[in-house]
Amino acid sequence: MIVQRAIESAGISTIIIAALPPVVRQNGAPRVTAPLVPMGANAGEPNNAEMQLNIVRDTLKQLEEIETPGRIVKLPYEYNAKI
Amino acid sequence: MSLTVVKGLQSEIYVPITPEVVWTPVEKPLKEMKVALATAAGVHLKSDKRFNLAGDTGYRIIPGDASSEDLMVSHGGYDNSDVNKDINCMFPLDRLRELESEGFIKEVASKHVGFMGGGGDVKVFKEETGPKIAEIFKEEGVDAVLLTAG
């Protein structure tokens, strides 16, 4: 989030895929998407290219959609890691 | 009416302080954008130096044409088992390339960045590492950065 803020401050729009949205909000991320994923698989289940592609595509779409800084958009994809 | 004023009085209840807003408006459609990835997941080329798992404020550049087979993770702060199976679950470079071939974005940047988040020296990240990474993307002419962290 620190790095995201640094990039955004330098004049480049950013968005973050977060597994822990409250933490990201607290740290002042400008744009956030939050699929239902564990930390360590933010972009989706391993070897599930379809889920990953959907998460990445929907996240990039939010670059155009989000107009309020700090907005968190939930994404309807779920992966439960078997630990 | 007179008020009782005590200088420097603070509430004993801690309240979260959110940093001030940073915002760069999006001014291009996605299909005209050059997009880069940045991740706090400790991703780097296998041939590159590993991160110091006890805390590392460095970063590693990952070339846009790197094969996902050539990438690995060194990060002491989260369960690496998913990302070891498939680097794309934290660093979706293959997916970004697919979106480029679809025409959904214009192009994948030729430089991406991995660093080790979730700790380390916050001051250095804020004052040095972050701005340095931003500079790399500025020089590249990147329009948007997709991050994975937190």
Image (cartoon, rainbow, N blue to C red):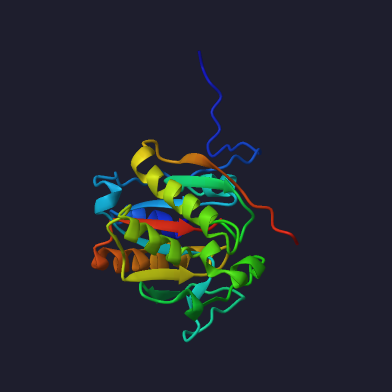
Q: Nearer the viewer, residue A52 or B120?
A: A52
Quadrant of the frame with the C terminus of chain B? bottom right
Q: Is residue B19 visible?
A: no
Return the x and y of residue B63 as percentages of the image width and height.
36, 75
In front: B139, or B35? B35
Q: Give the total number of marks visible in the rendering.
A: 0
Residue A58, x across and y down, in percent: 44, 46
Seen in the image, is A43 located left or right of residue B99?
right
Q: Residue at 34% of width from left, 71% of height from top? A: B111
Question: Height in image: B103 above or below B91?
Answer: above
Which residue lies at the image location 47% right of the left edge and 84% below the top edge?
Answer: B48
Which residue is most to the top?
B1
Say whether residue B69 is left or right of residue B99: right
Whether residue B128 is situated above or below residue A16 in the rendered picture: below
Q: Quadrant of residue B94?
A: bottom left
Q: x, y (%) of residue B122?
A: 51, 63
A14 over B49 or under it: above or below: above
Camera sees residue A18: yes
Q: Residue at x 59, y 68 (%)?
A: B83
**Which residue is painted at 59% across and 38% down in the image?**
B10
Which percent across, then down, holds residue B77?
63, 67
Q: Which residue lies most toward the bottom here?
A: B47
